[in-house]
Image: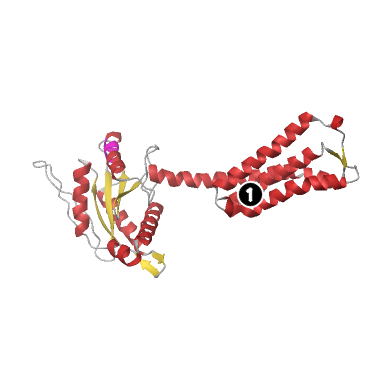
Amino acid sequence: MLKLHRPYLMLSACGLLLFPLLYAGMGQAKPLAHWKWLDILCEGGTAAMAGIWLLITLSSRPGGLVTRLLALGLAAIMLGSWADCLDEFFHVAKDQVWDNWLEALMPLGMLTLTAGMYYWRQEQFSLNEHLQKRERLFRDHRAFDRVTQLAGADYLRAQIRLEHARAPGMPCALVLLDIDGFHRINREHGQREGDRVLQAVGHMLLLNLRNEDLLCRYAGDRYAVLLPGMGQEQAQELAGHLCSMVGRMRHAAPAGPLAVGLRHACTLAEGNPEALLAELGKAVDLAPPSGGAEAGVAQSGGADDGQRRLAAA
């Protein structure tokens, strides 16, 4: 990551090397007896810590406005403190104001760093909202799917049970989405491009869901969406909307734009999660791809048998 930020590193390194030469050429060395060790320790320590923070920031962030502001602010604080520290070793005549300008880098750096932290705060709010869509009810250190960074089937089953316990009697819908002809994408464009399609579809679905909804990669090219507080009819409309949004995508593959279509099926998330997902899987196999008649799953059944029948609409 540091290779992406060479200009900031080179600028800081040049300042650290040139400042002592400037003070030595323009000032007069102070005798050892006049050195103030506490000031040297505090000002030099501030410069060293700001330099460490700069390296940590640049090694952990991509480029962008926030990174630029944080890097420039920390670099200015480091160089301003370094100039302040060198002032303890060299005497500069009062009629020369260049050293005051160098020391003024510290407050300027603090202002720049503060601006960077403000925009970083806004960025973090957006990331937190995105994480809520991925983790929904609680965060833990479970493993995410390697490709899409979404939760998997086991987490989905656990959340269906948790939703039953959390809000008994409240509607909760479950949608299963399947990428139409995904095996052809893998065969014709390669597995790496197939993985990129999975990531792109996952991002598009997340952008069109509520914070309380849960999106998982159920298996292979299938995604599952748990929709707390949403009934069958609303879920059917949302599923059609999700398919429509993905259908408008034109994935930028090396061979040219690639259209992606989805099949979908939905039902109320009631009963045993394993049986529910198995029935949804059968229903989505029979559903037409997006662009044709909308597919769905209808729920029916009486009290005499207590069974749910799933069928593609």
Residue 99 position within the rendered picture, expressed as x and y whole percent measured from the top left: 82, 44
Name the secondary structure under disc 1: helix
Residue occupied by mark 1? 69
Q: Residue at x 67, y 52 (%)?
A: 10
Please tell me whether residue 162 belongs to the stretch shown in magenta: yes
**Neighbours of disc 1 within 10 Å: few (<14), some (14-19), many (20+):** many
Q: Residue at x 73, y 42 (%)?
A: 106
| Residue 262 occupies quadrant | bottom left
Q: Name the foreground residue: 20 vs 5.
A: 20
Question: What is the magenta range?
Answer: 160-164
Q: Name the foreground residue: 76 vs 265.
A: 76
Residue 18 position within the rendered picture, expressed as x and y whole percent measured from the top left: 77, 49
Q: Name the foreground residue: 150 vs 288.
A: 150
Left or right, residue 182 beside residue 126: left
Main secondary structure of the magenta stretch? helix
| Residue 257 occupies quadrant | bottom left
Residue 158 position within the rendered picture, expressed as x and y whole percent measured from the top left: 29, 39
Residue 25 position within the rendered picture, expressed as x and y whole percent measured from the top left: 86, 47
Q: Residue at x 74, y 32 (%)?
A: 41
Q: Tell me if I can see residue 143 in this picture.
A: yes
Which quadrant does the C terminus fall into? bottom left
Q: Name the foreground residue: 98 vs 272.
A: 98
Name which residue type carries label 1. Answer: Leu
Q: Tell me if I can see residue 180 in this picture.
A: no
Rendered position, 35 above or below 278: above
Left or right, residue 115 beside residue 143: right
Considering every residue shown, the one lying at the far bottom of the view is 256
Please tell me whether residue 102 belongs to the stretch shown in magenta: no
Left or right, residue 261 beside residue 303: right
